[in-house]
Image (cartoon, helix red, strand yellow):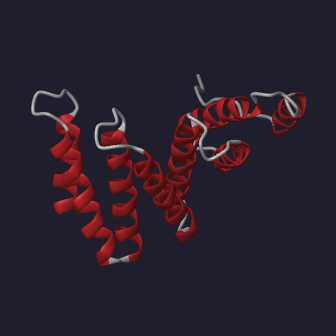
Amino acid sequence: CDSTPAPIDSQAIAIYRSVFAVHPERHRILQALGLTLMRHYDSSDNELSLKQASEMFQEALTLCPEWYADRHEILNNLSTALRKHRGRFEDQASISSAITGFREILACQSEGHPMRHETLDNLGWALLDFYHRFHDPKSLEEALRVFREGVAIRPEYYSNRNSSLSSLALALQ
């Protein structure tokens, strides 16, 4: 029995986009479609799904003003998709864009923001990917600093603190 998901039809995506072309919450619809495409990529390794997910997130981001409350979520999804794209292809522009996106999210999160540790981990991994691919020592230095900050802001009793410690240990190898 083949459990590979069926490809997502490009024509269906085009119809979905056109139906909601003037919807006042279009950015949310595009984000949801992008998440669906990214899940499809994760389960099928379909390159087109990842490319389309990135396009959906990019379009959703352009529809959100800088002050929009959920903008960081869209930017995080876009940066994650770009990082995945870089992981599969040797694309310096994608990983650089992912790093820029994670930095922008981090700049918007105050010291006590509940998702700051996650953004630090994402930025750290993107920087580490950049270092491994392009041998830039400044990227490694920043990745280590970012991972250390992630460990420092998680209390010792926090259930996911081990994740930050593991990320830091892997970066130090």
Q: Is residue 135 visible?
A: yes
129 shown above or below 122: below
At a point 35% along the width and 69% down the height, the residue shown is 132
79 shown above or below 173: above
Q: Is residue 173 visible?
A: no
Q: In this view, which residue lies farthest toward the left?
A: 156
Asked if residue 32 lies left or right of residue 26, the reply is left
In the rendered image, residue 168, in percent from the top left (x then y), is placed at: 19, 53
Answer with the quarter of the image where residue 20 lies. Answer: top right
Asked if residue 73 lies left or right of residue 62, the reply is left
In the rendered image, residue 40, in percent from the top left (x then y), is placed at: 61, 34
Asked if residue 147 lies left or right of residue 97, the reply is left
In the rendered image, residue 72, in percent from the top left (x then y), is placed at: 52, 41
Q: How many numbered markers are drawn?
A: 0
81 shown above or below 22: below
Quadrant holding the C terminus: bottom left
At a point 19% along the width and 37% down the height, the residue shown is 154
User: For this rendering, which residue is in front, 4 or 136?
Assistant: 136
Asked if residue 34 lies left or right of residue 138, the reply is right
User: For this rendering, which residue is in front, 40 or 74?
Assistant: 74
Answer with the quarter of the image where residue 153 lies. Answer: top left
In the rendered image, residue 172, in percent from the top left (x then y), is placed at: 17, 62
At a point 58% along the width and 22% down the height, the residue shown is 1
User: For this rendering, which residue is in front, 46 or 151?
Assistant: 151
At a point 23% along the width and 39% down the height, the residue shown is 163
Q: In this view, which residue lies farthest toward the top?
A: 1
